Amino acid sequence: MLKRFPPKVNNMEELKKLQLERLKWTVNHAYNNSTFYKKKFDEAGVKPDDIQSLEDIEKLPFTTADDLRAGYPFPLRSVDFKDIVRIHASSGTTGKRKILCYTQKDIDDWLYMFARCYEMAELTPEDRVQICVGYGVWTAGVGFQLACEKYGAMAIPTGPGNLDMQIEFLIDFQSTVMCCTASMALLMSEEINRRGVRDKINLKKIILGSERTSDAIIRKIKELSGAEEIFDIPGMTELYGPGTGLDCKYHTGIHYWADFYILEIIDPKTLKPVAPGEIGEMVYTTLWKEAAPLIRYRSRDLTKLIIGDDCPCGCFLPRHDKILGRSDDMFIFRGVNIYPGSIDSILSQIEGIGSEYQVILERRDDGKDYMILKVERAEDGDKSQDKKLAREINFEIKKRLLVNTIVEIVDYRTLPRSERKTKRIFDKRY
């Protein structure tokens, strides 16, 4: 499938050989050029020469978001300042932003990976790509745009929000591809439907990034927008940004670019590898990143490796499942550990409801915790069936998660939408 932006190797045997070669380079580069990594390795009693196999990666210490914040403003820096051509930053929801430096080679590698994503989604130079993600210090906007230009398609850099302009551009420019968060895609799709302009636009594909999504939301986006295909693109500023993998048209999992980084899946409690196919935390080690290499970086994102048959698309690179949640997103309700992704999965299988929901956790005067689950009725749903629908939802939640909920069915479009990431869990107990 990949022709212009292929992997640097031809099969898994060559991939492992390349990974080991580049892992050794990365460890040596970080140890010899980063005061942070030298101190970290010395404290762990590890030297670069200790890495002689891919399995030896487990000898290396973990890196965390706290390390990046503690090293502000130039954490993990492993090159001279004269070699740094750009910085990007994470959203900084807690404390200082996580700043990452890039050399020109880092930028080139990132755009190569990202262009590979467009190729896997089978875009052509005839496509017109409306880029509805944030610009500024974030990796999203500039990443989507520059990779689009590298690939050779037309970039339409609109940024997020401004629905009037977005709809106008979809109509006037006949955009064929839209890149955005799932929340923005839902907002846009509902607006396309509300304005009755679906037959005036030419939207074929949507690439979703930056946010965990559900099957129900994807179905709703397709239904309202008329898009034929929706792809999931992972992305994390610390790694490079978006564009480090994509699910192909067969949607058998996200092909990740293992010629540029190693992905480990670990148990977030024991910090040991989980069995193949089990859910765990994603840990990244970059293989050729110069300015701010990552070595065993704990992302807190949860997923599992896809094992079994090869993908029909023919790409041999490994796959992981979509992001299922974050290890620090988990909440405890009446002694049960619950991940938001579990609620997504359950609601996606129930007919008669919309794509939006909210979970509200509160502690009442009786000292007990209560979970209120607000779920939108389907757009054409029958209000007289609300009680029956609420009972069905509560039954499925209790069967799968072993907890009781207070289910409230609300009107379609009652719950808030967002052009960036929609907040759905509200814990008011503390």
Image: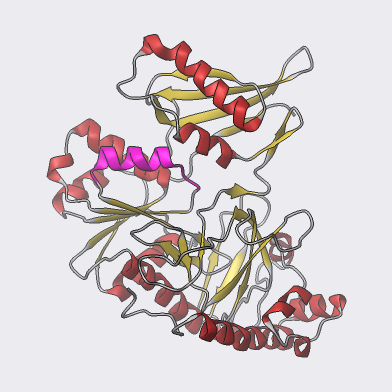
The quarter of the displayed image where residue 251 is located: bottom left
Decide which of 2, 396 is in the foreground and name it.
396
Q: Position of residue 213 (x, y in %)?
A: 47, 45
Q: Position of residue 376 (x, y in %)?
A: 43, 24
Answer whether residue 42 is visible to the viewer in this image. yes
- Asked if residue 383 lies in the magenta stretch, the reply is no
Quarter of the image that includes the C terminus: top right
Q: Main secondary structure of the magenta part?
A: helix
Decide which of 7, 396 is in the foreground and name it.
396
**Side (left or right) of 359 relative to 154:** right
Q: Position of residue 312 (x, y in %)?
A: 36, 65
Decide which of 325, 125 is in the foreground and name it.
325
**Side (left or right) of 148 relative to 298:** left
Answer whether residue 82 is visible to the viewer in this image. no
Residue 325 sits above or below residue 399 on the image: below
Decide which of 379, 183 is in the foreground and name it.
379
- Asked if residue 215 lies in the magenta stretch, the reply is yes
Q: Position of residue 178 (x, y in %)?
A: 30, 54
The quarter of the displayed image where residue 183 is located: top left
Residue at position x 63%, y 40% in the image: 339
Residue projecting furthest to the top: 384
The tally of labels here is 0
Which span is picked out in magenta? Answer: 212-226
Residue at position x 56%, y 21% in the image: 394
